[in-house]
Image: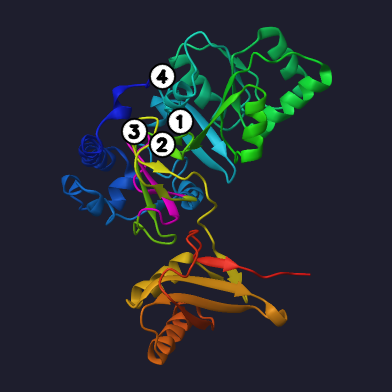
Amino acid sequence: MDYYDSLETRSPAEREAWLMGRLSQQLEHAQRKSAYWRQLFAGLAADSIDSRAALATLPVTRKSELGELQRAAPPFGGLPATPMAGLSRVFASPGPIYDPEGRGQDWWRFARVLFATGFRAGDLVHNTFSYHFTPAGFMLEGAAQKLGCPVFPAGVGQTDMQVQAIADLKPAAYVGTPSFLRIILDKADELGADISSLGKAVVSGEALPPTLRKLLNARGIVVRQAYASADLGLIAYETPSEEGLVVEEEVLLEIVRPGTGDPVAEGEVGEVVVTSFNPDYPLIRFATGDLSAFLPGISPCGRTNVRIRGWLGRADQTTKVKGMFVHPSQVAALVARHGEIGRARLVVDNAGGQDRMTLYCEVAQPSDALQAAVVASIRELTKLRAEVAFQAAGALANDGKVIEDLRRYE
C-alpha cells in the first residue's frame, strides 16, 4: 500500500518521542515570537513540557474566545508568530474571526488526505470549496498542487455550469461538501450529462451520512472525509480502511472533558484539543469546540497514528436557565470539588412549564450528606437551585454531554 511519507508508519513510541521534542521547541518559539503566548506562558520553562501529562497542566485557549481576543488586539489577537508582512493571505470566518495563512506549499497540510484517497500527479481536481472570504478553496488547491494535480477552481453554486465543466474537462477527482456532490450528480442526471470521470472525492465541512456514502459509492466514487478547521488546517482524515479518522502527523491531539483541560480515558467522548506545530500560527492546546473520542488500536490500513471517531457534536453546551447562563466549566468545577463524583450531567427540562435542573452524578457510595453538599455547591456555583440524583458508575451515556437541555416549547 502506498503512503504519503514514512511518518505515517512510524512506531507509536517513535512518533511520541518526536512529538514531545517538537512540543518544547514550539512552546519556546511561541513564547519568543507571539505576544499572546508570551503572556499566557509567562515564566514557563518550555523544556519542562516534555510529556502529555505536562502538556495537560497548561491552560487551553478556546476557539470561542478568538473573536474577543482579536477585537482586543487586532487583527489576530497576538497569536501568530509571523507578522502581517510575512503572510500570503488573510481570511475571515463568521464572527468575524480572521485567520492568517503563511507562505509555502500546502501550508494547511491537506496533501496527506488527498494522497490517501488516491489523488495522483496529473489528476484534474474539481474544487467546489469557496475561494471567497474563507480558506477552504485555497486549502485544497495548495494540497492538489503539491501532488502535481491541476485544479479547476469551481467554487460554490452555478450547478449547471459545474456539470458542463465536469462533462467537458473530465476531472478525475472532486473536493467539496458531500451534499453538493450529490446535487451535482442529480443535476447531471437531469441534464443527461456524462460526469462519470469523477472517481474519487475528498469531502469536508459537514457530516457524511452512511446513506450518502453508499449512494456516492454506487456511482463509482470513492469518498474520504477530512476533519479540519480554518485555524488549524487538517486535523484528521479518513483512509482506505474507513474505520475512524487518523490524526494528521503534524498535530498533537488530546480529548478532554468539556469545560476543562483534563484528558479523558480512551474511548470516552470529550472535546478535541489540538496543538499545532505550524511555525507561523502556533496554536497550543487549542480547544476546537468539537466532540470526538479516541479509537483503540491502529488502523487496518497500516497507518500507526491514533484515530478518532470523527465529529460527534459540539462541546459548548452552555445554556440559560431563569436568565442565568450555566456553563460546562461550572459542572466541571463541581465535580472537582467533590471527589466522590465520577462523572456528572446537568439535565435541564421544563416539566410543568417551569425550568428545572437535575444533576445526575455517578458515585460509588451515595449518602444524604453528599447529596446536601452537592446541592449547596450547585447553588454557590450557578446561583440556581437544582435537584441531585445519584447513579451507579458507568450509568451516564458516553456522549460527551455535560449539560443536556430537554426543554420543549409548544
Is residue 37 positioned above or below 8 on the image?
below
Circles 2 and 1 in contact, beta carbons < 8 Å = yes
Residue at image position (24%, 54%) is 53
Q: What numbered label is drawn on residue 246? A: 2
Q: Start and end of the magenta stretch?
A: 266-288
Residue 275: image location, x then y, percent: 34, 43
Snapshot quadrant of residue 33 = top left
Identify the residue under disc 3. Answer: 250
Tag nearer the camera, 2 or 3: 2
Tag nearer the camera, 3 or 1: 1
Mark 4: few/some/many CA within 10 Å (<14, 14-19, 20+): some
Residue at image position (60%, 18%) is 199
Q: CA distance from mark 2 to mark 3?
A: 12 Å
How did the renderer colour the structure? rainbow
Helix, strand or loop at label 4? It is loop
Which badge, 2 or 1, comes first in the chain's sequence?
1
Q: What numbered label is drawn on residue 105? A: 4
Helix, strand or loop at label 3? It is loop
Tag nearer the camera, 3 or 4: 3
Identify the residue under disc 1. Answer: 239
Q: CA distance from mark 3 to mark 4?
A: 15 Å
Q: Please state which amino acid type lies under the numbered disc 2.
A: Val
